[in-house]
Amino acid sequence: QAKKLSKESIIKILKDNGGQHSQKDIRRHFKLSEAKISLVISELEQKGTIRKEKKGRKNVIVLVSLDQKQQLHESSSDQ
């Protein structure tokens, strides 16, 4: 059964998979286009909730912890 696409559902998938999952495998949870999934992932990336890492030809989506978010915020405000 396909899940409803939301930022929360993607975060839950990441949490259920040790904090990271390939973008392709995330897409398998939803019956939606690659573009739609990519759009939601981009929104989460802009908020600093996740980061996208290139591993060869695939993207691995990594959940950013609160500590990492704080460090990112502090380093960006230092500039």
Image: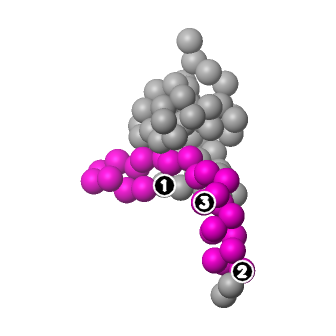
- Mark closer to the observer (1, 2): 2
Q: Quadrant of residue 45?
A: bottom right
Looking at the image, the residue that sits furthest to the front is: 67
Residue 44: give x, y in percent of width and height. Answer: 65, 51
Bin the neighbour count of mark 2 within 10 Å (Cα to Cα): few under 14, some 14-19, many 20 and up.
few
- Left or right: 70 with respect to 51? right
Instruction: Answer whether residue 73 is magenta in the image.
Output: yes
Residue underneath mark 1: 52
Residue 71: give x, y in percent of width and height. Answer: 63, 68
The region drawn magenta spans 53-77
Mark-to-mark CA distance, 3 and 2: 14 Å
Mark-to-mark CA distance, 1 and 2: 22 Å
Answer whether residue 31 is visible to the viewer in this image.
yes
Bin the neighbour count of mark 1 within 10 Å (Cα to Cα): few under 14, some 14-19, many 20 and up.
some
Task: Tell me the number on the disc at residue 68.
Answer: 3
- Which comes before the other along the chain, label 1 or label 2? 1
Q: Determine the secondary structure under disc 2.
A: helix
* Residue displayed at 48% across by 47% down: 61
Residue 3: give x, y in percent of width and height. Answer: 62, 21
Identified by mark 1, the residue type is Lys
Q: Determine the secondary structure under disc 1.
A: strand
- Mark closer to the observer (3, 1): 3
- Which comes before the other along the chain, label 3 or label 1? 1
Identified by mark 3, the residue type is Gln
Task: Tell me the number on the disc at residue 77.
Answer: 2
- Left or right: 20 with respect to 4? left
